[in-house]
Image (spheres, grey):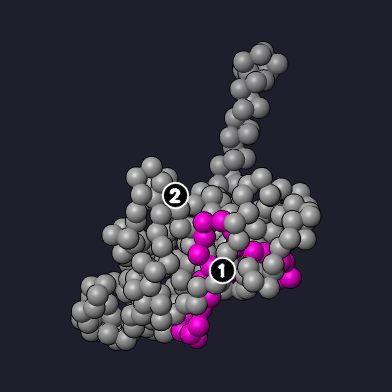
């Protein structure tokens, strides 16, 4: 991921196909000559978020759903697939200003608070469909204002060290770490062509799917082992 997302490794058909491809020096180090660098302030409009706590949420029903910063930090992968991930509902009776806080496809949500340096973890909204979801407490809701990005590129890139290391000087607090919107306006992202972004995102998505398959297989064998242990250790099954 680090090689692909920083341009140190190029996929076939992208960039000069020579033994010594051209690179240029930037704020983020050497990058391919045909890539660009832009700041968050140039690519995002920062939208408002709500302040609903866990007490305002449930896991079963409601008209609106809420992306909680704790789930961004711990639970969700870089790409928040809204058709698959479990997103809490807001309790009925709570006034939700959806027109103000609602997310749209492709939005970036950043956790602005954590108990350690994981502050700044990012998810990119994907497969939103008809769901009504808002961005919750201790998050930045970032909406792209340029057409420079293919789906999933920012979600993957903004969770890499090349991005997160730029946040470290702006993290404040001792017991609780935090970053401010103002402080991160000048943090940079790398921008290949949209075609190359798509190709890289497809490679990484395929790897994610393979990992999910392997995790499911691992869980299956763990359950099988548990069942066999109970049978063997209680004598219900005897070895030959």
Q: Answer left or right for 227 relative to 7.
A: right
- Residue 229 position (above or below residue 31): above
Regarding residue 69, the answer to whether it shows in the image is yes
Residue 158, horizontal then vertical, whole percent: 42, 66
Q: Answer left or right for 2 relative to 30.
A: right
Question: What residue is disc 1 on?
Answer: 48
Residue 64, horizontal then vertical, whole percent: 73, 61
Range of residues picked out in magenta: 126-150
Instruction: Give the number of callouts.
Output: 2
Residue at point 32%, 60% (across, down): 170
Quarter occupied by residue 197:
bottom left
Quarter occupied by residue 132:
bottom right
Residue at point 69%, 59% (across, down): 65
State the residue in front, 98 or 14. Answer: 98
- Residue 106 position (above or below residue 21): above
Residues packed near mark 2 inside 10 Å, few (<14), some (14 to 19) or many (20 plus): many
Question: What residue is disc 2 on?
Answer: 114
Residue 76, horizontal then vertical, whole percent: 55, 55
Find the distance from the CA under tag 1 to the CA under tag 2: 19 Å
State the residue in front, 16 or 76. Answer: 76
């Amino acid at each position: 991921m680090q090689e692909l997302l920083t341009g140190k490794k190029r996929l076939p058909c992208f960039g000069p196909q020579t033994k010594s491809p051209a690179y240029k020096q930037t704020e983020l180090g050497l990058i391919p000559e045909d890539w660009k660098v832009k700041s968050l302030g140039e690519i995002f409009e920062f939208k408002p978020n709500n302040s609903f706590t866990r007490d305002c949420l449930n896991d079963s029903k409601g008209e609106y759903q809420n992306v909680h910063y704790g789930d961004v930090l711990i639970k969700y992968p870089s790409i928040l697939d809204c058709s698959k991930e479990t997103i809490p509902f807001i309790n009925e009776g709570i006034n939700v200003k959806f027109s103000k806080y609602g997310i749209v496809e492709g939005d970036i949500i950043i956790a602005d608070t954590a108990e350690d340096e994981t502050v700044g973890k990012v998810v990119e909204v994907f497969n939103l469909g008809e769901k009504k979801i808002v961005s919750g407490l201790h998050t930045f809701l970032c909406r792209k204002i340029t057409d420079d990005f293919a789906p999933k590129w920012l979600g993957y890139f903004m969770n890499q060290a090349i991005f997160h290391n730029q946040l470290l000087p702006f993290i404040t607090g001792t017991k609780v770490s935090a970053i401010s919107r103002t402080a991160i306006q000048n943090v940079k992202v790398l921008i290949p062509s949209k075609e190359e972004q798509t190709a890289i995102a497809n490679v990484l998505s395929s790897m994610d799917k393979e990992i999910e398959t392997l995790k499911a297989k691992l869980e299956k064998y763990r359950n099988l082992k548990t069942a066999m242990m109970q049978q063997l250790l209680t004598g219900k099954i005897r070895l030959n």
